[in-house]
Amino acid sequence: MGFPWGLLGRDMAVDLGTANTLVYVRKKGVVLDEPSVVAVNLHTDRIVAVGTAAKEMIGRTPPHIATLRPLKDGVIADLDAAERMLRHFIQVAHKNRYLARPRVVVAVPSGTTSVEQRAVREAAYEAGARRVHIIEEPMAAAIGAGLNVGDTTGNMVVDIGGGTTEVAIVSLGGVVVSKSVRVGGDELDEAIVNYVKKEHSLMLGERTAEHVKIKLGNARPGGDETTPLPIRGRDLVTGLPKTATINRAQVREAIEDQVQTIVDAVQSTLDQCPAELAGDLIDNGIVLTGGGALLDGLAERLEKAVGMPIHLVDQPLQSVVLGAGRCVERFDDMQDVFLPETRR
């Protein structure tokens, strides 16, 4: 078998998410989908685990091992950890890692500052990229959802990720109006932790709260409201392990403020929509994507609030990386959707 020259620097797209990082490789599709978590040995400064293996360690490590989430609220909070995580993922995606110098398209939230964009570029260059292009997440999500973003017709996208909710109206290959609120899956988990702490004097772990959200999270009454789900944590009074129960109605109450923030963000973006595009949105409706789009009843709640059809995409967790991947497949045609490189 000959040497796989085709892999040399094969271009890739990265959805560097607060909760998960996804990597798309040209002509191969999505090759990696792992939690954005790094476990580091503080004594030796060596990486112990990245991705799924590191997430399994959250809340279970001895003092000399730290589990880090390099991204917070959709932006890089720990540049060193982000570089190391990105390098690991690029190397996993590129089997002949020593030769790989790919062009990389990275998706970032729409409210990202030039300083934050520079941090993303630096992380990608340090991780071995030959050239780095940045695309805004709502634009990538719109492309991934199959919308024709280069058209004069207006389209609206609501992308609910782990750290942020991105709301944008896109037309002619650009974002016309956008709003980014720092509410996403992580804040829903946090709200559940705080609710259980207040109502049951019980301290829940991060992963338990996420499990409760996935099982019982909802944005409207209906379904099995009172069937309890057992939850385990540490009693804040005695300090001992304790089991309590929570039901669907209680979880809805716990996350109500966060859900309302998302609804408000959609409404305030619509308020700023140019009149010419407003008619398009009535015809086309709003595209809902991102992991938070899977929250039971959220599409109906939004539909009722704005009086327009809401379309949940087929692969909400992957639409950003698929959109960025489409840019990788058609680099020359898609130059207009990338953000201009900011000068130092």
Image (cartoon, rainbow, N blue to C red):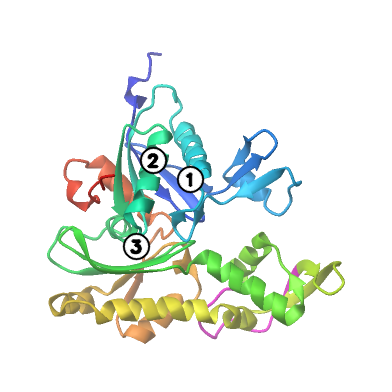
Q: Main secondary structure of the magenta part?
A: loop
Three-letter code for the amino acid on which mark 1 is drawn = Leu
Query: Which label sits on residue 165?
Result: none
Q: Residue 18 location in percent, x, y?
A: 49, 56
Three-letter code for the amino acid on which mark 2 is drawn = Glu
The picture quadrant where one finds residue 97 is: top left
Give the magenta-colored segment's residue range. Answer: 216-231
Q: Which type of secondary structure does the marked residue at label 2 adopt?
A: helix
Q: Which type of secondary structure does the marked residue at label 1 adopt?
A: helix
Q: Is residue 308 left or right of residue 78?
A: left
Name the residue that disc number 2 marks: 122
Residue shown at the point (54%, 77%) measured from the top left: 218
274 up-or-down from 128: above or below: below
Alpha-carbon distance for marks 3 and 2? 18 Å
Name the residue that disc number 3 marks: 111
Find out whether the residues at labels 1 and 2 contact each other: C-beta distance under 8 Å: yes
